[in-house]
Image (spheres, grey):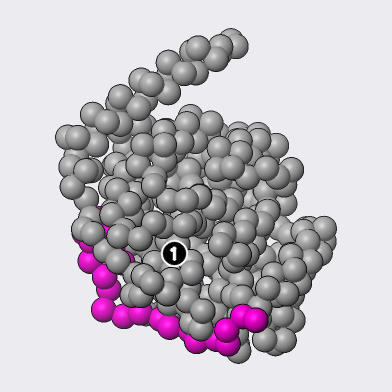
Amino acid sequence: MKITGIAVKLISLLTAALYLFVGGINGVMFAGKRYAPENAEALLLNAVLTADIHVDSDPLHPRNVWLMKLLRGIARSDVPVDALVLAGDNVNLAEQKEYGYLKSILRMYNKTGCVIPSMGNHDSGSTSMGKDCEKTFETTCANFRDFQRFCGIESDTNYYVRIVNGYHFIVIATDEMLDAGDPVLHEEQLEWIDARLAEAAESGKPVFVVGHEPIFFGGRFTDEYVLSDGTPAGLERIIQKYTDAGTLVLFVGGHRHDLMTQECFMNPSENFYCINLPTSTKNDEDADRNGDAAALEVYSDKMVVRPRNYISGEWYDYRFEIPFEKAP
């Protein structure tokens, strides 16, 4: 059955009304506290890093409500937030309906300058739940790219670059759906990553690579990014070519659903940093940790990552500061 434009608008209005009601009875408007960057006058980039929000096909699911509260908390910044990074698993089963609810929630509660999503294994349908739903990669890619367009990203691929205030966010994504869930990077994408890193390095500014699965964990590179034959793709070697030459790179990942701790932030080699984000809205074991994310503040001579729970409005008692030479 073909859905007309009028029907789509009506569904959107009904969904918006539903989320206004849900937000009202769940205290969404009271989530979070006002907060500020460390040095508002010198701030060059103000972003928030999140992962694994897993929006559900049940519009009243607790995860969807947690997301409303998270976004409301992020919106309480005293300085406009330039970008919201969604480091994969944006929806739970890669369904169009889930993306519809995600769009509605973002329309109502997101106040950041732009949204930068990456494709997680749940977004690609590469999970046991996804297989039960008999999804095809073609279908899940179509749904994800429709969400990309909603976020203002025109790309024929699941990977793309977004430049915010002169800073490059290089977003990578799987080229295939595998039962194991590991992201597959074809040679074409690896060459593309290399070329985009070269372009970004010319700016002299820090570069952000966003992928769902972490690239470094437990003191070693993970080998989770593979070629079609299952062998390691060597993504870290491409990045290290530029970090060895002096470009500072922060790799932003999620996927593991670990709690936010100091161990989430790593420095595998000179100029190469990684943050493995917790799930921001899918913590079933410790509900008080829903809302965990990280503020990313970039200044002319340093980058600061500040973990925060945006729903309770509390900063964690540790932060990460990376000094670097000023860009010319």
At x 61% / y 64%, what residue is drawn? 166
The reply, left or right, for residue 199 in relation to residue 308 is right
Residue 125 visible within the image: no
Hey, which quadrant is residue 246 in on the image?
A: bottom right
* Horizontal side of residue 70 vs 193, given as left or right: left
Q: Magenta segment, principal secondary structure?
A: loop
Looking at the rendered structure, the secondary structure element under dot 1 is strand
Residue 85 visible in rendering: yes
The residue drawn where x is 50% and y is 40% is: 93
From the viewer's perspective, is residue 33 above or below residue 124? below
Which portion, as a residue range, is magenta? 308-328
Crowd tier of the residue under label 1, counting other residues whose Cα lies within 10 Å: few below 14, some 14–19, many 20 or above: many
Q: Nearer the viewer, residue 33 or 289?
A: 33
Q: Is residue 165 left or right of residue 22?
A: right
Quadrant (top left/top right/bottom left/bottom right) for the N terminus: top right
- Is 246 magenta? The answer is no
- Image quarter for residue 187? bottom right
Image x and y of residue 27, in percent: 18, 42
Q: Amino acid at mark 1?
A: Asn
Tell me the residue that label 1 is attached to: 46
Indicate the quadrant containing the C terminus: top left, top right, bottom left or bottom right: bottom right
Residue 184 percent coordinates (x, y): 71, 58
- Whether residue 317 is in magenta: the answer is yes
